[in-house]
């Protein structure tokens, strides 16, 4: 069973930065796509950013220019210029497309507040 573990969440003031990390129990490059999702209270989970095996990235419109997804042995989400509306639980997601497998971490809380 694949395990994903997020870290790096916390409380930050508006305009601040955080870097989230996701560790996987198998090689990151064994996954077709790695992604970060978020879910705020009372809202649906939404895709924030994703990166495929060859490094192509995609972002939610509201985070473009502020967030950056990257990966080496881990997957990261660098979040800059944070806004209160970025407050949510952030989840790491991994997919292996050719076998239809998908995995989720347990989430890390990000709170943006003064």
Image (tube, grey):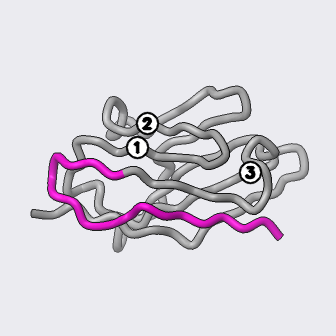
Q: Quadrant of the N terminus?
A: bottom right
* Marks 2/3: CA–CA distance: 19 Å
**Magenta stretch in the rendered image:** 1-18
* Marks 2/1: CA–CA distance: 5 Å
Given the current orientation, which residue lies at the most extreme left position?
Answer: 114
Judging from the image, what secondary structure is the residue with disc 3 in?
strand
Magenta-drawn stretch contains 10 = yes
For marks 3 and 1, the one nearer the N-term is 1
- Disc 2 vs disc 1: Cβ atoms closer than 8 Å? yes
Label 1 environment density (alpha carbons within 10 Å; few <14, some 14–19, many ≥20)? some
Q: Considering only vertical position in the picture, is 7 above or below 59?
A: below
Name the foreground residue: 55 vs 38: 55
What residue is disc 2 on? 68
At a point 29% along the width and 62% down the height, the residue shown is 87
* Marks 3/1: CA–CA distance: 21 Å
In the picture, the disc for residue 95 is 3
Judging from the image, what secondary structure is the residue with disc 1 in?
strand
Task: Point out the frontmost of discs 2 and 3.
Answer: 2
In the picture, the disc for residue 62 is none
Q: Position of residue 43 (x, y in %)?
A: 38, 66
Task: Point out the frontmost of discs 3 and 1.
Answer: 1
Q: Position of residue 58 (x, y in %)?
A: 53, 33
The answer to whether residue 30 is left or right of residue 84 is: right
The answer to whether residue 106 is left or right of residue 3 is: left
Q: Quadrant of the C terminus?
A: bottom left
Q: Position of residue 69 (x, y in %)?
A: 50, 39
Label 3 environment density (alpha carbons within 10 Å; few <14, some 14–19, many ≥20)? some
Label 2 environment density (alpha carbons within 10 Å; few <14, some 14–19, many ≥20)? many
For marks 2 and 3, the one nearer the N-term is 2
At a point 54% along the width and 64% down the height, the residue shown is 6
At a point 78% along the width and 65% down the height, the residue shown is 2
């Amino acid at each position: 069973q694949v395990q994903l573990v997020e870290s790096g969440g916390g409380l930050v003031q508006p305009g601040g930065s955080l870097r989230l990390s996701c560790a996987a129990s198998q090689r990151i490059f064994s996954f077709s796509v790695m992604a970060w999702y978020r879910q705020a209270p009372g809202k649906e989970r939404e895709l924030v950013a994703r990166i495929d095996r060859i490094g192509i990235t995609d972002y939610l419109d509201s985070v473009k220019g502020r967030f950056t997804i990257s990966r080496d042995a881990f997957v990261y989400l660098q979040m800059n210029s944070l806004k209160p509306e970025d407050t949510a639980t952030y989840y790491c997601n991994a997919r292996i497309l050719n076998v239809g497998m998908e995995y989720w971490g347990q989430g890390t809380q990000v709170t943006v507040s003064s």
